[in-house]
Image (tube, grey):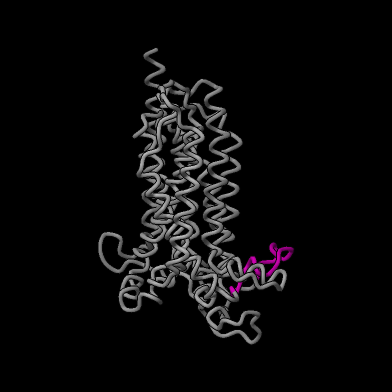
Amino acid sequence: MYPTLYHFFYDLTGWEVGFLKVIPMFGFWVITAFMVASWLSVIELKRREEAGYISPKLKTVTIGAKTPVSEYVSNGVIGFLLGFKIGYVFFHQEVLENFPSFLISTQGSLIGGLLVGAAMVGWKYREAKKTELPEPYEKEVNMHPYQHMSNITMLSIASGMGGSVIFGTLEKPYLISEFFANPSLGISHLYNGLSVYGGVILGILIGMYYVWKNKLNLIQFLDALVPTILMAYAIGRIGCHMAGDGDWGIVNTNPQPEWMSFLPDWLWAYDYPNNVNGDGVPMTNCIYNDPKYCNHLVPSVYPTPLYEFFMSTILFGILWSVRKLITIPLLMFSLVVLAMGVERYIIEQIRVNTVYEHGPFAGFTQAEAISIGMIILGIGMGIYSVWRYKKNQAHE
């Protein structure tokens, strides 16, 4: 397994590229997932615009206006923070061994911060002067639906990472006490205990808020964007598997079925060597110098992230291939919610997870409770969307 991109390239090539330690394997795949979802969403929004389901809106923009002082300030602050941390890392690469803890520390380079901050302000000033006019003027331009995807994607990435932390903490409450007891260790565990499910859910909610706030067609955006979430979820699960972040299944000591004999053994049971959590027992031969990444699971477990990757990819392929045939508003959204709920509920039966002992969800894992809610929501909204469509058709 590869806790960071550094470990991946070291295993692949033998090269030690130190700065790659700052990029966690899980985080890399989550960002990739959002990028792929954004690309697919643009394709679908363009198709829906050409089909006449959605249309561009006029937007008034000011051409040649002076850049607000707040933008210079924000560029300077961002530049200072980047230089403050990166400048220190450049001369103290040992902090890369526990980068999450370094990020929340007060360690940094004052000179690096000032230099990069000044450079960012200077760059912003130079770019601003290229567009400023002696007499600014207003102009109406068409804003196509797909042109909102860059904003939606950035908001979804930020909120998705927040959702991953929130849901991961709710699923494993001990992470909070670990953080306050030992911030250095606790932030590392939070960093590696993220929840893909939580990221997807909060990312969708914030994206919906953006669409509503900008008075766009929420139903059409939901139907266009949610199928891509299945693909994003599948890609996120690649990150879970490659990092070995604990989202694996229960112990599997059963013999591999005969009908699976043509598949590699690790698809049936896997020991997640060098997993990012350091779970399991020490390995006899470890390619990494850091002992915290030199454990593996004994006995092996079901590699459930891979199963979820295959299941979600297949579900996405089916719904994406028939999307042009589904013309009832909200029906596609309902089908995706239902599919995600069923998929996750099935996988929870062989997956390691924390079971709630008290409250209304006692006896269930967090994901099972959410999955049941999604199944009910998907079925209910599907029935409602068909009923509403037939009712409207009858009145035409």
In the rendered image, residue 210, in percent from the top left (x then y), is placed at 38, 38
Judging depth in this view, the residue of 81 and 164 nearest the camera is 81
Judging depth in this view, the residue of 159 and 395 nearest the camera is 159
- How many numbered dots are placed on residues in this image? 0
Judging depth in this view, the residue of 98 and 323 nearest the camera is 98
- Asked whether, in this view, residue 293 is left or right of residue 284, the answer is left
The residue depicted at 53 percent of the width and 42 percent of the height is 38
Judging depth in this view, the residue of 18 and 223 nearest the camera is 18
Asked whether 258 falls inside the magenta stretch, the response is: yes
The residue depicted at 48 percent of the width and 29 percent of the height is 145
Residue 270: which quarter of the image? bottom right
- Asked whether, in this view, residue 393 is left or right of residue 254, the answer is left
Q: Is residue 260 above or below residue 31?
A: below
The residue depicted at 62 percent of the width and 79 percent of the height is 288
The residue depicted at 40 percent of the width and 46 percent of the height is 72
- As drawn, the residue found furthest toward the front would be 134
- As drawn, the residue found furthest toward the bottom would be 284
- Asked whether, in this view, residue 82 is left or right of residue 265, the answer is left
The quarter of the rendered structure image containing the N terminus is bottom right
Q: What stretch is highlighted in magenta?
A: 256-272
The quarter of the rendered structure image containing the C terminus is top left
Q: Is residue 129 above or below residue 315?
A: above
In the rendered image, residue 388, in percent from the top left (x then y), is placed at 37, 26
In the rendered image, residue 138, in percent from the top left (x then y), is placed at 40, 22
Does residue 353 appear in this view?
A: no
Residue 304: which quarter of the image? bottom right
- As drawn, the residue found furthest toward the right would be 262
In the rendered image, residue 353, in percent from the top left (x then y), is placed at 43, 67
Does residue 342 appear in this view?
A: yes
